[in-house]
Image: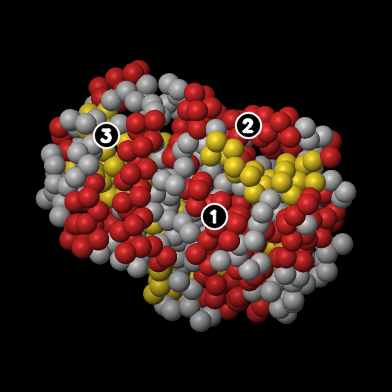
Amino acid sequence: MKEANFIAIIDFGSQYTHLIARNLRELGVANTIYKPTVNIKLLSKTAGIILSGGPNSVITNPIKYNSKILSLPVPILGICYGLQLLAHKMGGKITPGKIREYGLTKLHISKQNILLQGVNQNSTVWMSHGDSVTKLPKNFVSLASTTTLPYACLAHTTKPIFGLQFHPEVHHTKFGQTILKNFIFTICKISPTTIEGHLEKITTTVKSQVGNKKVFLLVSGGVDSTVAFALLNKILGPGNVYGLHIDTGLMRLNESREAQKSLNRAGFKNLHIFRAGLIFLKNLKNISDPETKRKIIGQTFLDVKCQVEKKLKLNTKHWLLGQGTIYPDTIESGGTRHADKIKTHHNRIGILTKLAKRGLLVEPLKELYKDEVRELGLNLGLPPELINTHPFPGPGLGVRILCLSKTQTTKLNNTSLPAIKVNKYPSRILPLLSVGVQGDERSYRHPLAVSAPYKEAKKLHKLGTHLVNKNKIINRILLTLNNKNINLGVSREAYITPLRVKVLQQIDDIVIKELKRAKIYYKLWQCPVVLIPFGYKHGESIVLRPFESREAMTGQAFLLPPIVIKKIVNKIEKLHKIDYIFYDLTNKPPGTVEWE
């Protein structure tokens, strides 16, 4: 039974649910995430309840939940879907929005309340919703509004029940942490408690799960798998951990060699390399669908792992599979019951999910975010340059090389796409699709390319969120950097080939080196470089995606200095292999960090 000093979080499927838990953990407050149908007995000793957001609609597609939750004699805070659920249940009116709202907006406080104590009267908040409250339930008052929402924050007049249409758990909400502190410490009257460190908790869990077995860990060379590798070596001892780095042929330039050198310098001698580029390229031949690519890559990892096991004559009964899975991998893959699948991560394909349920998959970092993983890695003594390297997806360049079949190409090029005016500048909706996340739901839509000088990037960045919210056909805003007529370009049939991999490796290397020369590399969360089968001469174009974030669940496009952009563009054009060079100005949401 939990102590009375904890918060219960009811998960309605938001991409940000775990951010709520993580914010509370940082404040020294114990918390547990429950499904909406939770047995009410498990909540008998909670000090307060937070209802998360989610992708569903309380009007057209409500989530089944235990209604007794709302009758418990403890403070309740509803966020986004949670607010709408409270308002709907208590007699208010919920209406689908004419414009789905994503990103930053201004909040104006009209009535002071204990929940908003210490919050500026006008501040920035993060929205991600479609439906909204259009009529207050009885005994509720509005505390704040935005330009589009009269009821952005509600409070019951006599009970400690509150609702927020925006997301306080997202760090882009300027006073979000203040609001959560007010709810937890002042309203729920919880005193901060000391929670066991991640390392102690993970150590106990791993030892209990592994017992007297050993772990066969897949090590990509990225931050997550490297920290998982170091952690398991510490907990179980090097003799009980076999680290396998599979060179997929889809790595960045010299990535596998550098990963091995870095880990050797850090003192790890139990990392082994297996060259499997030909196997991956063969399995991906003529594959264009991004979800299919991810699943094939995930399965090929497992096939190669089994091949190595047979070669080493390992008794699989004595070995468990290990991965460096972190929480965003799970939530974006639809890993909680009501979360929408944004994209399947290669480490979350069906067979791995089944292994996890049977306790046969060791994932020591699965409850953590990237910055927490980095902090843990530094505590383990890993070199800062290794820990602070940019995240790189497990499927590697396989999801940064967009592919199209002949049928897809014909359909996209022949689709009549509407014109969207962007001030005085030429613009075009491109005949391509990319993954996004809007209102906690997956979107698969077109990018809008704008031909404008780079000095206009800041204005277009701000305008971008409005354009995406207003136009359902798009989910990204691109700036054309090399001043070429975008109306000339068409999409073409293309797949993953050695030549396309080589081209992207060259350009990715150019970008990374220029970012490091300008001492900007470590200011960014990530800078994906995407190869797209679109153009008029070479049939290939590049998208630069500099991105800043804290945990990758939300974030903003990062604007590079003009001199850096100029150097990158000049070096890419000297290759004579690329038609257009685009700059992705899209925040998350509505665009995910990666394009696939």
Towards the viewer: 165 or 225? 225
Q: Is residue 7 left or right of residue 436?
A: right
Read off the residue under disc 1: 261
Mark 2 and mark 3 in contact? Answer it, CB < 8 Å: no
Residue 230 rendering spot, x and y as whole percentages: 67, 58
Foreground mark, 3 or 1, reads: 1
Could you say which disc has been placed on residue 540 in the image?
Answer: 3
Q: Is residue 17 visible?
A: no
Residue 483 rendering spot, x and y as whole percentages: 14, 46
Say whether disc 2 or disc 1 marks the residue closer to the N-terminus: 1
Q: Is residue 422 left or right of residue 63?
A: left
Q: Residues within 10 Å of mark 1 (few under 14, many from 20)?
A: few
Residue 400 rendering spot, x and y as whole percentages: 41, 40
Say whether disc 3 or disc 1 marks the residue closer to the N-terminus: 1
Could you say which disc has been placed on residue 304 in the image?
Answer: 2
Amino acid type at image mark 3: Glu
- Residue at 73% of width from left, 29% of height from top? 310
Amino acid type at image mark 1: Lys
